[in-house]
Amino acid sequence: MSAAIPVQIPGLGQAIAGLDWLMLDGLDGKRTEINQLGRGVNAAWQFIWSMKGKEDEYVAFLSKNEAKKKPFAAAVAVRSAISDETFLAMIEIGEGQWWLFGIKDGMPANKMDRVGEASELMGLVRDFLTSLSDPEQVPIYTDKPELFAGLPYTLDVRPFSLEILSHSVKKKAFDKAAFSRHSSVPFGAIAVCVLLAAGVGGYFWYDHEAEVAARRDAEVNRQKDIAKRKVELATAVSTAINAGRPAQVVVPVYLDALKKVPTLIKGWRLSDVLCQEQGCALSYEAQAFATWKGYLEGKPAEWPAPLLGGDIKRVEQMIPVQLPTMPIRVATALPSRDKAMFDMGNLAQVSETIGVVIRPQGNSERVAGTAGKPEDQWIPVKVGFTANGKAVLLDGLAKRLPASTGVLKIGFKGVGEKMTFDLQGEAYANP
């Protein structure tokens, strides 16, 4: 058996990670095989992993020393929260320890329920991805996406943590992850006697059980839909609060790119610039005797072809900008709405004295979810804002903008000391 480790899931309780999932081959009958496997590990608890429509089944055991009272399987809790048939989850559980869990076609992947240091587990991650026909299509749920940055794939990395798991699993669904008692007593003969004694009552009991099972299946499907929505909602929130790039990161990169842009190219003068995400759009206006041919001959060779539209007095030129890896914002680290508004207002008051105008735009709005739903009250909010002034002051402003704000785009007009900027951004906060 692997080193089973109790993990604390906020609001739900402890669950066991690092289980050995053993496949039942069914040759000697499931009960006989479970008894044989359980004796070998002195099992006191068992959990059978099965899936509707699949013949394969897996079992995990725990001894009495590993669990004094009824334990819960952490892997099953994660499976109830994530609807993907194949996925990989790797989350930090504290004290430098990580929990790795993989599902393949709805079943536990071989040796992929493990607890250890990140460096140890990444070898298992590589083996798992290599075993897949298309690893880039398999979602990876983690609270440390940079661990996967060095892998030779373009991976679908999604935010996940013990906290997100606690929001994604209801107590009833978590209860279904409970182990049952394991005993090697031969129940076969006893069961036959009980069935014979039941007699005619068995028919009515079966009818009642079928009705109960139908209600239970309906509830299970409802809980799965709720869990799926919570995971999708957590992903939508993470995407929304990371839409704006940190000003401290992107502004220096944009300004450095502009330093290398010629203001005059064979009769074409730079008039304005718009930087957004990983590119800047340059607009050049024609001076006397300027031609498109002259522009093509004079522009830097590494630039892509310009956009030549219906206005023969203008040239639109896109240039790529290489942005570094961005720090990921998490909802729990955001300030309160009042704190965010105070910080923005205070900065606006100070900046106004040097000619930089910052204006928040209207009321805050939730970044995802449905307004009025009690279960969506935790969702962060955003407030749009603009800032404008002389371009020479932009770098100083970027250093003072709160970390919970993000830049959507920055426009520049003019050249040299007369250049001005117009920044559009968002501030993110907890309600």
Image (cartoon, rainbow, N blue to C red):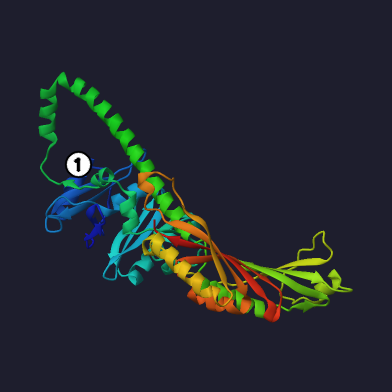
User: Regarding mark 1 in the picture, which secondary structure is present there?
Assistant: helix
Question: Looking at the image, which residue sits at the far right?
Answer: 289
Residue 150, x across and y down, in percent: 47, 70
Residue at horizontal 37 percent and vertical 64 percent from the top: 333
Residue 332, x across and y down, in percent: 36, 61
Residue 319, x across and y down, in percent: 68, 70
Residue at horizontal 54 percent and vertical 76 percent from the top: 353
The answer to whether residue 149 is seen in the rendering is: no
Left or right position of 81 against 393: left
Viewer-nearest residue: 83 or 130: 83
Q: Which quadrant: the C terminus?
A: bottom left
Viewer-nearest residue: 21 or 239: 239
Residue 326, x across and y down, in percent: 49, 69
Viewer-nearest residue: 395 or 6: 395
Q: Against 397, is 361 above or below?
A: above
The answer to whether residue 97 is seen in the rendering is: yes
Left or right position of 194 against 140: left
Residue at horizontal 20 percent and vertical 20 percent from the top: 204
| Total numbered labels | 1
Which residue has dot 1 on it? Answer: 31
Q: Could you classify mark 1 by the number of other residues whose Cα lies within 10 Å: few (under 14), some (14-19), or many (20 or more)?
A: some
Hey, which quadrant is residue 301 in on the image? bottom right
Viewer-nearest residue: 48 or 159: 159
Q: Which quadrant: the N terminus?
A: bottom left
Q: Against 314, is 201 above or below?
A: above
At label 1, which amino acid type do we have? Arg
Q: Against 301, is 224 above or below?
A: above
Left or right position of 137 against 275: left
